[in-house]
Image: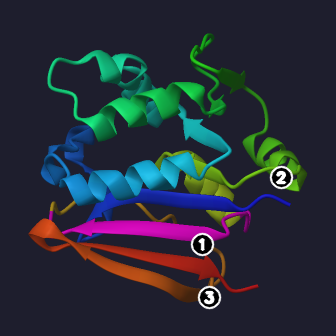
């Protein structure tokens, strides 16, 4: 059975984007943090995206390694992003590229089916999609990278839940600029 990991950058007050879907609050990541995200992505056997995150990622990473100032880590991230199989869940788009499959039906049924398969861990991104998986009890691990900024509103990382989810702390790490990564596993 595959593990499902939900990880994103967020503000200290718990948002992945500020009002108006503004993600500029995070600024460019330090080399260390970018490398940590690269390692996270390289460990994934399959990436699951909601529409908004897919649109953000697919607008840059297919050619991110061809940008004039791309660092070696960014070049590797772009190559890994293109090579990693991806599934996009959306009822409003009709075409995806770059080693990606589109699912327009029941996301929870498909994620449950994918989890039951053999293979490496899966990552999930996008607050709406991850929120549905969270409410269904499908998330096995949370990777939370908190930036020292308060934005006061926007898109929250966590969704409202029907019951508590108990977690075990697995890792804590501090990065330049006061950015803190914590990783938790779901206690089952």
Mark 3 vs mark 1, foreground winner is: 3
The residue drawn where x is 60% and y is 51% is 123
Q: Which residue is mark 2?
A: 112
Q: How is the image coloured?
A: rainbow
Residue 14 position (above or below residue 163): above
For the residues bearing labels 3 and 1, Cβ distance under 8 angstroms: no
Residue 54 horizontal/vertical position (percent):
48, 30
Residue 169 position (above or below residue 121): below
The residue drawn where x is 61% and y is 41% is 47
The tag earlier along the polypeptide, 2 or 1, is 2
Q: CA distance from mark 2 to mark 1?
A: 18 Å
Label 1 residue SS? loop
Q: Which residue is mark 1?
A: 161
Residue 164 magenta: no
Q: Which residue is mark 3?
A: 166
Q: Callout 3: 10 Å neighbours few (<14), some, many (20+)?
A: few
**Left/right of residue 180 with respect to residue 125 in the rendered view:** left
Viewer-closest of 72 and 148 = 72
Residue 44 horizontal/vertical position (percent):
61, 49
Residue 3 position (above or below residue 173): above
Q: CA distance from mark 3 to mark 1?
A: 12 Å
The residue drawn where x is 17% and y is 63% is 152
User: Which residue is farthest front?
Assistant: 72
Q: CA distance from mark 2 to mark 3?
A: 20 Å
For the residues bearing labels 2 and 3, Cβ distance under 8 angstroms: no
Give the position of the C terminus as an image quadrant: bottom right
- Which residues, given as a range, are shown in magenta? 136-150
Mark 2 vs mark 1, foreground winner is: 2
The residue drawn where x is 44% and y is 36% is 53
Label 2 residue SS? helix
Label 3 residue SS? loop
């Amino acid at each position: 059975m595959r593990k499902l990991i939900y990880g994103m950058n967020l503000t200290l007050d718990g948002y992945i984007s500020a009002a108006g879907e503004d993600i500029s609050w995070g600024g460019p990541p330090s080399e260390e943090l970018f490398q940590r995200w690269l390692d996270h992505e390289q460990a994934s056997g399959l990436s699951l995206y909601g529409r908004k995150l897919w649109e953000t990622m697919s607008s840059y990473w297919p050619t991110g390694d061809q940008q004039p100032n791309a660092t070696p880590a960014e070049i590797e991230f772009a190559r890994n992003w293109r090579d990693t199989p991806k599934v996009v869940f959306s009822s409003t788009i009709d075409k995806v590229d770059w080693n990606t499959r589109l699912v327009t039906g029941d996301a929870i049924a498909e994620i449950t089916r994918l989890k039951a398969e053999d293979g490496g861990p899966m990552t999930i991104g996008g607050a709406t999609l991850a929120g549905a998986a969270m409410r269904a009890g499908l998330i096995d691990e949370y990777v939370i990278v908190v930036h020292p900024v308060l934005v006061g509103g926007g898109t929250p990382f966590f969704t409202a839940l029907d019951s508590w989810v108990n977690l075990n702390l697995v890792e804590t790490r501090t990065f330049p600029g006061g950015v803190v990564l914590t990783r938790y596993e779901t206690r089952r």
